[in-house]
């Protein structure tokens, strides 16, 4: 049965009643803590407030373009609490590296074919996992009159490739798609991992569509006929990673984000409390649409205009 009642609207006066029941807060980043390169007003004050109260704060982003260390520097530069280090941050790059490490790929001679950005490279380097395929890979020696590449020279023999990782890559092209598909099709034991399947990512210009990793993952998935292990929200590997890093109680943990299909669904699917902030992608209309279409796993328990709207008046500058 569909919920007919809207989630509870939260503000600074109502929030303390909820706060007493929460030990751990998990925050999405873009659209919640920052938007592009700009800090979200009021968000540093809100996290300061939580940390002063002894609450655990975890930042969980679906952006794998940068490493956790780089995101920690970004938080510091934007004025967030000094206790928020790379060890407070989870992103798909770290979960990909952890997943491959747990699979034991570092104990073999096999490498990872990677379609992705610097963040994934950095996290793989941290765990001594070998990879190749990064950067531009132009299609060379191709006749203009031939619509397809019929002869493909692979960088590594199929038997030497233990995994294909696909994430956001501004250099993605047909050549990379063909290589990824061939590694996956020619060896069924080759692991297929995707950082995330977000369709788009937010940016400073609302009129410009910015494709995220999702379209790239879909291309490789269709070409190879293989289903990837997706590690980013709302999928379970990100939750498992958090659980083996921190001793969280889902009943006393709240997921706060700006997207119903990643953040809210992640929380609902894993038994967390949920709040949507309206400072990023999704709005109240999206909640209503989810309710009307019986997508209750994307309906949050609470919503608020932004994190700054939850800061007690005495804590505001």
Image (spheres, helix red, strand yellow):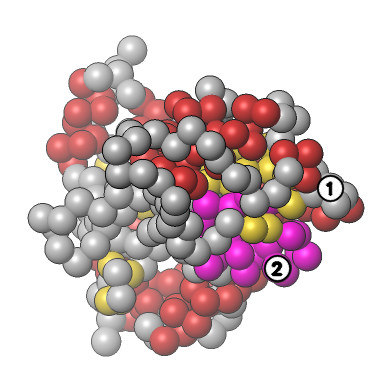
N-term-proximal mark, 2 vs 1: 1
Q: Is 296 placed above or below 21 here? A: above
Residues under numbered marks 2 and 1 in contact, where contact means CB atoms less than 8 Å apart: no
Determine the residue located farthest toward the left in the rendered image.
Answer: 207
Q: In terms of depth relative to the viewer, which is nearer, 306 or 101? A: 101
Find residue 121 and report its horizontal and vertical position in percent: 61, 65
- Residue 315 lies in the magenta stretch: no
Whether residue 108 is visible to the viewer of this picture, yes or no, is yes
Count of all numbered marks drawn on residues in the image: 2
Image point 83% across, 55% down: which residue? 106
Image quadrant where residue 130 sits: bottom right
Image quadrant where residue 6 sits: top left
- Residue 124 lies in the magenta stretch: yes
Find residue 271 and report its horizontal and vertical position in percent: 54, 36
Stretch of the chain drawn in magenta: 112-130
Q: In terms of depth relative to the viewer, which is nearer, 157 or 206? A: 157
Image point 64% across, 37% down: which residue? 183
The residue indicated by pointer 1 is: 104
Q: Is 54 placed above or below 197 here? A: below
Disc 2 is placed on an element classified as helix
Q: In terms of depth relative to the viewer, which is nearer, 145 or 94? A: 145
Image quadrant where residue 24 sits: bottom right
Q: What quarter of the picture does the C terminus occupy?
A: bottom left
The residue indicated by pointer 2 is: 125
Q: In terms of depth relative to the viewer, which is nearer, 67 or 41? A: 67
Image point 71% across, 26% down: which residue? 188
Whether residue 39 sits left or right of residue 131 in the image: it is left
Disc 1 is placed on an element classified as loop
Q: What quarter of the picture does the N terminus occupy?
A: top left
Whether residue 213 is visible to the viewer of this picture, yes or no, is no
């Amino acid at each position: 049965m569909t919920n007919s009642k809207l989630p509870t609207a939260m503000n600074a006066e109502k929030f303390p009643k909820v706060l007493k029941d929460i030990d751990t807060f998990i925050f999405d980043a873009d659209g919640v803590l920052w938007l592009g390169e700009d800090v979200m007003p009021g968000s540093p004050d809100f996290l300061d407030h939580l940390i002063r109260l002894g609450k655990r704060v975890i930042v969980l982003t679906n952006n794998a373009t940068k490493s956790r260390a780089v995101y920690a520097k970004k938080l510091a530069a934007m004025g967030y609490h000094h206790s928020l280090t790379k060890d407070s941050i989870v992103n798909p790059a770290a979960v990909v590296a952890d997943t491959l490490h747990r699979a034991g790929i570092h104990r073999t001679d096999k490498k990872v074919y990677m379609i992705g950005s610097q963040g994934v490279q950095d996290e793989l380097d941290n765990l001594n996992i070998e990879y190749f395929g990064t950067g531009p890979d132009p299609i060379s020696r191709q006749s203009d009159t031939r619509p397809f590449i019929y002869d493909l020279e692979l960088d590594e023999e199929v038997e030497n490739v233990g995994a294909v990782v696909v994430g956001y890559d501004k250099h993605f092209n047909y050549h990379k798609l063909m290589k990824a598909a061939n590694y996956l099709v020619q060896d069924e034991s080759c692991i297929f991992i995707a950082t995330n399947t977000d369709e788009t990512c937010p940016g400073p210009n609302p009129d410009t569509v910015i494709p995220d990793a999702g379209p790239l993952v879909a291309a490789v998935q269709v070409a190879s006929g293989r289903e990837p292990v997706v590690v980013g929200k709302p999928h379970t590997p990100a939750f498992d990673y958090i659980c083996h890093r921190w001793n969280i109680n889902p009943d006393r943990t709240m997921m706060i984000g700006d997207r119903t299909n990643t953040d809210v669904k992640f929380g609902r699917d894993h038994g967390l409390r949920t709040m949507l902030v309206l400072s990023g992608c999704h709005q109240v209309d999206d909640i209503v649409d989810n309710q009307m279409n019986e997508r209750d796993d994307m309906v949050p328990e609470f919503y608020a205009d932004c994190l700054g709207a939850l800061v007690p008046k005495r804590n505001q500058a």
